[in-house]
Image (tube, rainbow, N blue to C red):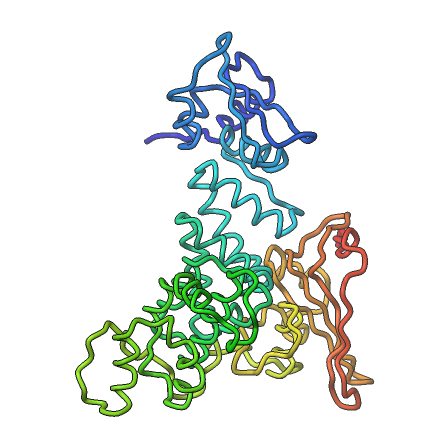
Amino acid sequence: MSSKFFEQLSQDFTQLLESEYDYNVVIEVGERPNIQFFKGHLAILYQRSLYFRQKLVNAVKKNNIIEIKLPTISAKFFNIIIKYIYGGIVSLENFEVSAKFDLLVAANKLEAAELVKHLQSQLIKDNASWLRLNFSRVYQISFLNKNFEHLQQFCNNILTKHPGIILNSDDFTTLQENALILLLKIDDLQIEESEIWDKVILWGKAKILNLSSNLNEWTDENFKSLKITVQHCLPHIRYFQIPGKDVLKKIKPYQQILENSVWDDIIARFVDPDAPITSLILPPSKKETVQLPPRKASIITPTSSIITLLHAAEISSWIDRCSTIYDITEIPYEFKLLFRGSRDGFSGKDFHKLCDNIPGTVVIVKINITDKILGGYNPLVWKLGLDYVTMADSFIFSLKNGNMNQSILSRVSYPSKAIWYDIE
């Protein structure tokens, strides 16, 4: 039988980092005027980070010291990462979600695979609403890094049923080509093929400078530029799924960007559906033929006695900061009942027993005399304490009910005092 003493081992190596005893590596982190220097040990950095291993193998020592520069990583994030490298511990309590995502990107640059995997899982589990709210950025970055497979799957699961979340976003045209192609490759993408064509053309035109908005003013050179820009996207469009009227209205004006064989096959298919084709055109996408069901089999489990599906859709929209309210068939969250006063008790102790340490909770109360429904959303966990926690995404609300025809939403004005943890 073996015994493990990892906690003390972690403390010892963390103390070695802090003491700087017998260091032989100096790491310059950040850019002026915010440069900081960290002192480390070759053997530990070599063993714990593939990035440092590659850097250290061929490094030349100066006065028995190896110097490494990391200008693209902030000292704030590197301080967290190097403590993880030495002690295997990462503390992200009271860490803004945006900073946590930036830490993930920094950890990936240093090829800290274990930390990258952990941060992805934590973001998806605890901060899904932030990922949705910043979807375009998350999607682009995740597909630029092969190690972000968990985030990639998270994004694909959303895009399959809700492609508009990126196709209709304000920064769609900034999407990297490989990210757009990966989107086009999704077989069961729930969007009309003619809309996909529109988006590819929009994306391509945005990449070309000084392009007239009037197609009649385009030169052959303009069409050639567009053809080159979208050449890797066009093979992923299922042309035979585009109705004839849209072929004439949307595709024909851009006929010059298609290979002659592709255009000939599109026209031939409408004249004679059984005619053989000579070009490579993908088969139809696996479109849903009925209205999409809710994301979850049960949105509120068990059935709430206070709020309805309409209320759940409204709260979900506030969490994601949507400009419009979700349809009840598109609610992206599962509302699971954790605590009910009439069943579990009304004391603070009862509440904390069942709700502590669970992120992303909504508290709902109904006032007996007025029937008003009040509540609040806490993206963080509930716990006992005696301090404020910084959070910009929490909010309180009053839901429409009875004589109240309009819901009221109140967001945080001072994030540094958004949430107060009390001792009981």
Question: Which residue ends up furthest to the top in the rendered image?
Answer: 63
Q: Nearer the viewer, residue 120 or 284?
A: 284
Q: How many marks?
A: 0
Residue at image x 39%, y 85%? 247
Q: Quadrant of the C terminus?
A: bottom right
Residue at image x 72%, y 57%? 392
Q: Nearer the viewer, residue 47 or 50?
A: 50
Residue at image x 72%, y 68%? 376
Q: Is residue 301 visible?
A: no
Rendering coords of residue 38 (x, y %): 59, 23
Rendering coords of residue 238 (x, y %): 33, 77
In the picture, measured across the screen, residue 227 lies left or right of residue 305, that is left
In the picture, measured across the screen, residue 319 lies left or right of residue 285, that is right
Residue at image x 56%, y 20%? 39
The quadrant where residue 214 appears = bottom right
| Position of 339 relative to 373 (above/below) | above
| Position of 49 relative to 217 (above/below) | above
Q: Nearer the viewer, residue 366 or 359?
A: 359
Rendering coords of residue 381 (x, y %): 64, 56
The quadrant where residue 280 appears = bottom left
Q: Is residue 17 visible?
A: yes
The quadrant where residue 135 appears = bottom right
| Position of 102 relative to 346 (above/below) | above
In the picture, measured across the screen, residue 249 lies left or right of residue 397, that is left
Rendering coords of residue 30 (x, y %): 61, 32
Q: Quadrant of the N terminus?
A: top left
